Image (cartoon, rainbow, N blue to C red):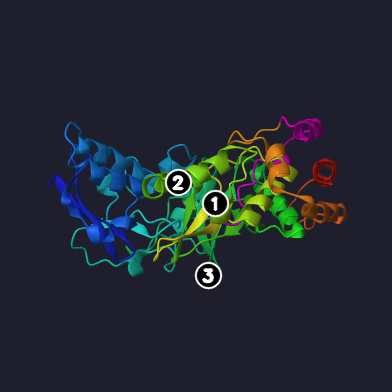
Amino acid sequence: MTQKRLVLMHNETELLVFNYNTESRSFSFKSCDFNLKNFNFLPTHFRRIFDLCEKSGINAQQIFSEAMARFLKFRVISLQREYSRKVMEYLKVRGTDDFGSMFDRLYFVSLNDVLWVKSYNSPVKYADINPYSNPLDPAIASLVLTGNADCFKSAQQSAFSYFAIDLSASGTQNKVWFKDNGTIMLYKTDEWADLSSPDCTYVNNQVYAEYFAYQIASFLGINSVKHDLEVLNYQGKKLVCSKCPLINGIDCSLVTMTQALDELDYIDQDLKTSLQKQCDYATAVDEKALSFLGRKQFADQSVLDMLLLNPDRHKDNYSLLKDNKTLEYRHLSMCYDNGLTLFALSHEYEMESLVDGAMNGTFISGNGVNVRSRFLTLCDESYLELLNKFRDFEFSNFSLAHFNEEHLIKITRCIRKNAQNMIELLEQTHL
């Protein structure tokens, strides 16, 4: 049997029936198999492909096959990840394009949304396999994070086919979703975080960076994802992990700014233009876009990025929340992804250089935005009290984190200097 008939679902709503050829590993569709009643629930790229069906000279089938393959690959662990091949071997899958071996095992679920894929006429319901309310496979989660199947205390081989498996956490760092006392948590670690290893280090380490960045955000009252630390003990190792809770849920998707702009380009080009301008230009003050994003959250994120000197703020690491029933966008999510801030640097002179660059207006974010210009454009004198408050800030629980106190003092010194610079800039600009 070379053809497998499949369905793309949104929760329990059928969106699109399509075919997979197991020999050519290609996808095909018929325009009559689109559920037009629920057309708006489809990912934008598939809506665009439907619009191409009646246009001559365009190979919509090839475009569809490539688009479906990309869509599914983004919902499977990247081969760039350290233990991806072990995960594939465990699942008896030959590669991330071996979709025939994945259907009816992974269902291509994600904790970012409620989309999934199943075989046509399959009796499986979303309630059976969704990762929000079902137990997440502990053995696979362990493999994704550490390369071993037993790092979580509850680790065991999947006992039944409906054990939820989420492999959609993006990026190259070792990370995975797993439930901790009923709460879905994102665990992150890296090769330098094994306390049993002589190579273990507290610098150049995103695990600690997220943990300490949250402490600052929390102290300042900035809405940011809470990060804690946990040490996983297994096979003689003591692996430090950061962990943070899921910030969306089964009723609400997490949509990156890149994805939101792509959809708005299809459904509301005026809003897309406003949002693009606000995202790409440091001195932009587009009230339509700021109202859509949530002005305070966008400004608070700009303060945190300037204070911690985050070079990694690009359109794939800040997101909007989207209602899964009404499809309405709500606002920006909590701040997240602070792993490459000052805490990740090794030497104080590197930190001081960045602080000076931010003061002089030469520090640029991953999105190509001048961080100082955006801070001064969005933040007025009302932020002076917030920044002055930082003078009383002290880190807590760094001994539990096995973090070098002397290094933390250096970081604190640089961030306090940066906070004072920000105060002076605000006073010069707004007073």
Residue 270 numbered tag: 2
Whole-number angstrom distance, CA of label 1 to CA of label 2: 10 Å
Q: Is residue 105 visible?
A: no
Task: Give residue 147's position: percent from left, percent from top.
Answer: 49, 46
Foreground residue among 33 and 338: 33
- Tell us which disc is closer to us: 3 or 2: 2
The residues colored magenta run: 333-362
**Disc 3 marks which residue?**
182
Mark 1: which secondary structure? helix
**Per the image, is 342 magenta?**
yes
Horizontal side of residue 57 vs 207, given as left or right: left
Asked if the residue at tag 2 contacts the one at tag 1, i.e. Cβ–Cβ closer than 8 Å, the answer is yes
Task: Give residue 353's position: percent from left, percent from top.
Answer: 78, 30
Foreground residue among 361 and 307: 361
Instruction: Give the residue type at disc 3.
Output: Gly
Residue 288 numbered tag: 1
Above or below: residue 348 compared with residue 2: above
Mark 2: which secondary structure? helix
